[in-house]
Image (tube, rainbow, N blue to C red):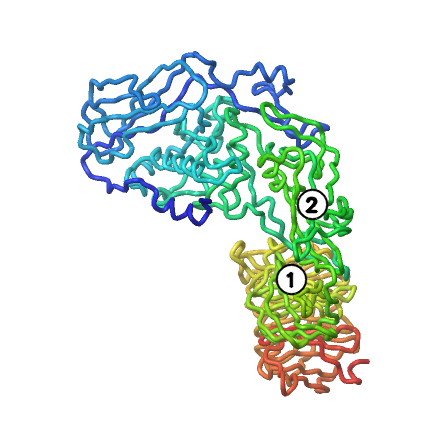
């Protein structure tokens, strides 16, 4: 039976540890750890050698000079067979009463080898050590130490009276701040004891248990790795952890451990002690050389490969290792990738990181199958390799499948390098493999029979094929939606429209069509799923989840053969759309407060998608604007990551170039709930500081210049510039548009107001001084001439009235763009002839 992450969660929830309520006035004999000496070093590596950057060059642990292979072989990393080693058991009394003299026993592979009885008692908080000498044997042997094995003493907890370690386990050194350590030893943990070591050792045991449960390409009966806690060191100062313990420049690997972990100072350890820390096991995985498998995820905003229309596909993906420990913290199994990586390094000391990525078959092939499972000959395949996580032209390589539907990936040049007792990097499709993830993912476009489809291959696909026995030749098969031979033609002219979460598709009918099928893909991955079958060339449905939705339509003939995809039609399920701006090339950028990215439309209104990094965190922010240089200015509210407010500026490629964020306040340069933003011809930035009833001006570099309108404005919502450098403010609380004229010293004075608008939320001024205002109270748009006379009103149509008009923009082609928050759409409304000029 295959054990997956969900089943692992259930198993761990049933993990057999006794939770005992700590008793007062009882001793608690606690076997803290078993230490082994002598110790021998792990691997010290240099990844920055000139000409070998990114390659783990083995160096001497003391001098850090590169080691030649013959020198590396002379470094002693394990005890020699027959060498006398010493195991030291650390025992403490973690109870509240003195422990009387007690028996103890050492066992090797379950056989008692040394017994004894202490001659005196053990006071609370006192630690004692016990030693066993043993002649080293290779392979796995179990060293166990027990106190009071016959349970002669009334003990507060019996589950911590023994400890067993595997001799071939990788050893970890733990260092802990004194205050944290003492707090743990005063606080009941989730095991029912008061012991920092018990809490740590539970995590060691669970890590080993996960190793036993996790899937492996080598099979369920294969050798399983082990870790052990060799020693816990308590320090007064955890800021220079290893320097204080081991000496200047010395790391745990140099000193003979396979890794080390530090626990810093925390004032409140109660919640820490009360729960498992699954992230700790994840981090210990790194100590063993395992990489973050989420480094193989690729968000859509980083995929700038263009489709046939010239738009970025913005298609992302999750690593196939998602749900496993090194991708997600939690009670998760280790992935088959991680298990095979560790299992292929039995007996090898730690220090290398991710060099198992080098396990790539010699020949790698991609096989393409159509809908019916038949090979697709002559399919065009194009591979892009990410650079710093971004996919864009030019592609890494491309070609066509042969008569068997197979394309052989070219082997690209890589430095020939073999890690000590490890793996060999050779020419392969990736070139120089990056052992931390960037560059290790291929995005692939497949085109055949009028159909375009995308797929992925990453380094783990190659590694798992290698470990599954395909070391020479590996074939990766992709069954696609490419139509079978003789399939009908695809529909054309697919059009999409939306109203809130409703979506309507229409397309040209296809002669002889038996049925149409509608497929939907949702950002970020755009995995298409069948959502409808219809006999007529239209479909009405719902966009069930937020984000970008792409729709494609196929035809099905009376034999059941299905066509290629039509051209895709893209729709956006807006949630809180508000601001809009026109970029220099005519594209529209929209701010929706529910999304952390910019929403981009083409000049014809079709959705491109979500652009810019999610890490810019625009969620909760409402307005944006474009300046003369094509920069995107965004009024920034606080978010769950940063409570500060102000504004951010992005460059023409949606990269973050500047941010001005301060704690929300009424001091100059600080803002509270800024709703609107704009820029003047010189690049100065003007922010509607709504919560402070004022406008603030900043220089192009973000430095504060002045406050405008203090004491004159009430809930200013939007700012815009008109002719003669005048500043127009949607002064919502005063039901007006306030017009400020510039003074010679750069300041502004209130010149006049335009009334007749109720609760204005957005203002726009055209080249002749006409003022376009969206009003909240009237749910419409009002256009005023320069003298304040109303020359046009728009409140939608009887069938689809405006409900919550917000952002406004002129597209330069005689249309007014209206962001309607309530109906969650962007309307393009033809202007009357007198306004279109």
Q: Earlier in the sequence, mark 1 or mark 2?
A: 2
- CA–CA distance in space, label 1 to label 2: 44 Å
Left or right placement of residue 535 versus residue 638 in this view: right
Find residue 71 and report its horizontal and vertical position in percent: 61, 15
Q: What mark, if any, has residue 366 been given in the picture?
A: 2
Q: Quadrant of the C terminus?
A: bottom right
As drawn, the label of residue 606 is none
Q: Position of residue 593 (x, y in %)?
A: 58, 65
Position of the N terminus, as image quadrant, is: top left
Q: Is residue 763 visible?
A: no
From this viewpoint, which residue is outermost toward the right?
837
Q: Give me the disc on residue 634.
A: 1
In x, y percent, where is residue 121? 20, 23
Circle 2 crowding by C-alpha within 10 Å: few under 14, some 14–19, many from 20 = some
Q: Secondary structure at mark 2?
A: strand
Q: Nearer the viewer, residue 831 or 359?
A: 359
Decide: is 321 above or below 52.
Answer: below
Asked whether 630 or 48 is in front, the reply is 48
Where is residue 281 drawn, in percent x and y?
A: 45, 39
């Amino acid at each position: 039976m295959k054990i997956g992450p969900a089943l692992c969660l259930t198993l761990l929830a049933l993990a057999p540890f006794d939770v005992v309520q700590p008793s007062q006035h009882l001793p608690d004999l606690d076997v803290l750890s078993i230490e082994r000496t002598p110790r021998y070093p792990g691997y010290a590596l240099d990844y920055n050698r000139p000409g070998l950057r990114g390659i783990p060059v083995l160096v001497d642990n003391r001098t850090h000079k590169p080691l030649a292979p013959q020198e590396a072989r002379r470094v002693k990393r394990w005890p020699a067979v027959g060498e006398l080693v010493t195991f030291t058991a650390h025992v403490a009394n973690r109870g509240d009463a003195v422990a009387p003299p007690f028996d103890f026993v050492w066992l090797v592979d379950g056989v008692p080898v040394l017994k004894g009885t202490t001659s005196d008692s053990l006071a609370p908080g006192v630690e004692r050590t016990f030693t066993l000498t043993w002649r080293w044997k290779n392979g796995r042997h179990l060293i166990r130490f027990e106190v009071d094995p016959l349970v002669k003493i009334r003990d507060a907890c019996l589950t911590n009276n023994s400890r067993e370690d595997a001799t071939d386990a990788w050893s970890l050194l733990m260092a802990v701040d004194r205050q944290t350590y003492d707090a743990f030893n005063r606080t009941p943990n989730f095991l029912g004891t008061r012991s920092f070591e018990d809490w740590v050792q539970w995590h060691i045991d669970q890590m080993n248990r996960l190793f036993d449960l996790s899937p492996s390409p080598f099979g369920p009966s294969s050798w399983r790795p082990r870790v052990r806690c060799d020693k816990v060191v308590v320090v007064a100062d955890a800021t220079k952890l290893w320097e204080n313990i081991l000496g200047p420049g010395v790391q745990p690997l140099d000193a003979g451990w396979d890794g080390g972990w530090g626990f810093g100072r925390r004032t409140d350890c109660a919640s820490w002690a009360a729960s498992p820390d699954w992230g700790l096991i994840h981090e210990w995985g790194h100590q063993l050389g395992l990489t973050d498998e989420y480094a193989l995820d690729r968000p859509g905003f980083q995929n700038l490969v263009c489709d046939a229309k010239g738009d970025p596909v913005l298609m992302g993906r999750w690593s196939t290792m998602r749900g496993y420990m090194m991708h997600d913290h939690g009670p998760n199994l280790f992935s088959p990738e991680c298990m095979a990586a560790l299992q292929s390094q039995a007996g090898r000391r730690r220090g290398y990181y991710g060099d198992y990525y080098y396990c790539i078959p010699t020949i790698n092939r991609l096989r393409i199958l159509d809908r019916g499972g038949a090979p697709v000959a002559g399919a065009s395949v194009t591979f892009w390799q990410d650079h710093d996580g971004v996919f864009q032209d030019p592609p890494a390589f491309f070609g066509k499948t042969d008569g068997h539907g197979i394309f052989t990936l070219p082997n690209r040049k890589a430095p020939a390098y073999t890690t000590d007792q490890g793996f060999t990097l050779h020419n392969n499709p990736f070139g120089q493999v990056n052992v931390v993830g960037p560059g290790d993912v291929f995005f692939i476009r497949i085109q055949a029979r009028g159909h375009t489809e995308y797929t992925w291959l990453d380094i783990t696909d190659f590694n798992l094929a290698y470990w599954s026995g395909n070391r020479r030749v590996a074939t990766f098969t992709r069954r696609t939606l490419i139509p079978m031979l003789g399939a009908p033609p695809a529909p054309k002219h697919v059009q999409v429209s939306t109203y809130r979460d409703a979506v309507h598709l229409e397309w040209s009918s296809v002669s002889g069509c038996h049925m149409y099928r509608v497929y939907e893909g949702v950002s970020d991955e755009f995995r298409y799923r069948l959502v409808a079958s219809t006999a007529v060339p239209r479909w009405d449905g719902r966009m069930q989840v937020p984000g970008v939705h792409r729709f494609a339509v196929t035809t099905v003939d009376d034999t059941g053969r299905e066509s290629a995809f039509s051209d895709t039609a893209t729709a956006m399920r807006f949630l809180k759309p508000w601001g809009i701006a026109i970029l220099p090339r005519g594209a529209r950028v929209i701010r929706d407060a529910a999304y952390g990215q910019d929403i981009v439309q083409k000049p014809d209104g079709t959705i491109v998608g979500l652009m810019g990094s999610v890490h810019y965190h625009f969620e909760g922010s409402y307005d944006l604007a474009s300046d003369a240089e094509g920069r995107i200015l965004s009024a920034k509210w606080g978010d769950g990551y940063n409570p500060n407010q102000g504004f951010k500026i992005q460059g023409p490629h949606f990269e973050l170039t500047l941010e001005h964020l301060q704690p929300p306040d009424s001091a100059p340069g600080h803002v509270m709930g800024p709703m609107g933003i704009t820029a003047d011809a010189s690049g100065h930035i003007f922010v509607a500081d709504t919560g402070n009833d004022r406008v603030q001006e900043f220089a192009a570099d973000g430095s504060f210049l002045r406050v405008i309108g203090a004491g004159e404005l009430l809930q200013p919502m939007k700012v815009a510039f008109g002719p003669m450098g005048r500043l127009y403010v949607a002064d919502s609380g005063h039901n007006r548009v306030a017009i400020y004229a510039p003074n010679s010293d750069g300041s502004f004075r209130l010149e006049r107001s335009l009334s007749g608008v109720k609760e204005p939320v957005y203002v726009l001024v055209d080249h002749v001084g006409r003022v376009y205002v969206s009003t909240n109270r009237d749910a419409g748009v009002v256009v005023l001439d320069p003298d304040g006379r109303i020359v046009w009103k728009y409140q939608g149509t009887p069938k689809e009235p405006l409900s919550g008009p917000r952002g406004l923009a002129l597209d330069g082609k005689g249309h007014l763009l209206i962001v309607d928050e309530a109906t969650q759409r962007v309307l393009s409304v033809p202007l009357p002839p007198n306004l279109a000029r």
